[in-house]
Image (tube, rainbow, N blue to C red):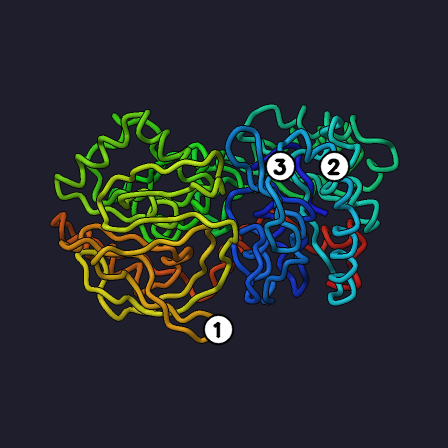
Amino acid sequence: MVAGTASDVGKSVIATAEGWRVAPFKAQNMSLNAAVTPDGREIGRAQAAQAEACGIAPTAEMNPVLVKPEAEGRSQIVVLGRATRSVEARRFWRDRSALWPVVTTALRSLRRSYEVVVIEGAGSIAEVNLWPGDLANLRVARAADARILLVGDIERGGVFAQLLGTLDLLPARERARVRGLLVNRFRGDTSLFDAGMRFLRRASGIPVLGLLPHAEDLGVPAEDSLALERPPSAAAIDIAVVRYPRISNFDDLEPRAAAGAAVRYVRKAAALGVPDLLVLPGTKSTIDDLEWVRASGIGARIVALADAGVPIVGICGGLQMLGTALDDRAAVEGPSRRVRGFGLLPVRTRFAARKRTVPVTGSVAASSALIERSLAISGYELHMGRTDRDGCLPFAMLRHPDGRDVPDGAVSADGRIVGTYVHGLFETAPLRTSLLRALARRKGVAFAPQEAPADRYAALSAWFRAAVDVGRLLRAVDLERHG
C-alpha cells in the first residue's frame, strides 16, 4: 500500500511509478476526475492511468467505490462503475460500512488475477475520526495484510511533523506495517536534506527509501483540485480554463499543457484577460456552476470575449453551458428548474437520471477555425443529459460500442466556438496539434507543439528510479522474490 500524510502528497504518482506488471487498487476514491473502462464502467482517472502504466485494461474492481461531490453537501456514489444514488455526506459517512463487502470482493478478484496488487490509500492514513467504517486505508491494509509505504510532501512544509505525527497516531500493529518512508517534491540540491533523512530514520526507526525531487509534469492525472493551484509555465499559447467550484475531469487539459501551452485555471473575471483560447470544462453540477459563473462576473466576460472573437471550447458541462437552455425539470442535479445558457451555441440540454458512460471513437465532422475536419477522435462520454442541436453542425461523428454512428456536440456558424461531450479528446496527438497550431496562426506566433513520447510513463519511471533504490524498496515490502 502507498499511503499518504495528506491529500495530493504524491500517492497516485508513486503508485503509478511502481507500475510493474501488476494491478492498481484504490478501494474508495473521492474525486471528480473520472474515466470510463472498455466495458463502460466509471472509475477514478488516476486508477485508469495506473492500469495503463501496468499495461493492462482498467476495470471497475480497481476502484470499486467512487465518491463524486455535488452541490449542498451531497455526493454521487458510484459502485463498481455504476452511479447508484446521490446522498448527503453525513448519511454516506454513517452508512458507508455497508460497502465493505464490495471492497473486499473487488480486492479478492484482483488478487486472484495478478501476482501483486499496489493499493493506493486515500487522503491521510491517520484521520482517526474516519477509522470507524474506513473503506480505503488501514482497514484495507489489514484485509490485504499489506506492507505500507508512507509518503510525505516537503513542499507543504512540516514534513517531519507530517511523517512522524502520522506514525505516532497509528496503532502499534498498523505502524508495524509501515516498511518505508518517502519524501516527495523536494526542490534544489538533495544533499542539503541528508541530515533530514538521517533524522527521520533515527526518529522513526523506519528506513527512508527515497527523496523524490519536485517535477512539474509527470504525466499522471491529478485527483484533487489542489493540483490546480500550481502556476502554469510561460508559453506562447495562453489557454484560460474557467475553474468552477465543482470542476470535473480537469485532466482533459493536461495534454495541451504537456504540448507546451500555458494552461491556467481562473476563478475571477479580472484574471481572464484575453486568452488565445477559453475553455469551459466539465462539471459535476452544471446548473449550480453556471449560476456561480454568472454571479462571479465571469459569465459576462465569456460573452464579451466571444463577441471579441476569442475562440471557445466547451467540454461536457461546458458544452451544456454554451447552449441556449438547460432543462432539469426532472430534478436530476438538484431542485426542478430550467435556466438559460450563454446562447453561444444553438443547442438545448435536457437532463436525465441515467448516466451515459461509454468509450467512443470517431472523427471530426465539421471544419472549424480550431480543428481540421476528418481528424480521428477517441475518448469517452461521461454525462447525464441529452443535448439537441437547433440547426448547427455537429462537432464529430462517433462510433459507439453498439455500432451506431451518432453526432456529437456542436460548432458555431463562424467555427470559433466548439462544444463536445468527449472527454480525453486531446490525448490524440493530431487533433491536439491541429488546435494548437490553429491558435498559433491566429496569434501570429511561431509554435511547435511538443509531442508526447511513445512511452508516456518512461519519464515517470526514470524520475522514480533515479531517487529510489527499487531493489531496496522491494526487499522492504517483502517483494524481493517478484523483482
Sort mark 1 into few (<14), some (14-19) or many (20+) by Cα contacts within 10 Å: few
Q: Which residue is mark 1?
A: 402
Determine if residue 10 is in view: no
Q: Earlier in the sequence, mark 1 or mark 2?
A: 2
3D distance between C-alphas at marks 1 and 2: 37 Å
Confirm or deny contact between disc 1 and disc 2 (CB under 8 A): no
Q: Earlier in the sequence, mark 3 or mark 1?
A: 3
3D distance between C-alphas at marks 2 and 3: 10 Å
Q: Which residue is mark 3?
A: 87
Closer-to-camera residue (284/119):
284
Q: Secondary structure at mark 3?
A: strand
Residue 401 percent across, percent down from the top left: 48, 71
Residue 67 percent across, percent down from the top left: 61, 42
Query: Residue at left 74%, top 42%?
Result: 135
Query: Residue at left 54%, top 55%?
Result: 462
In the picture, the quarter occupied by the C terminus is bottom right
Type of amino acid under label 3:
Val
Q: Secondary structure at mark 2?
A: helix
Q: Earlier in the sequence, mark 2 or mark 3?
A: 3
Q: Which residue is mark 2?
A: 95
Residue 150 percent across, percent down from the top left: 70, 39
Q: Secondary structure at mark 1?
A: loop
Type of amino acid under label 2:
Asp
Closer-to-camera residue (470/93):
93
Type of amino acid under label 1:
Asp
Query: Residue at left 66%, top 40%?
Result: 122
Confirm or deny contact between disc 2 and disc 3 (CB under 8 A): yes
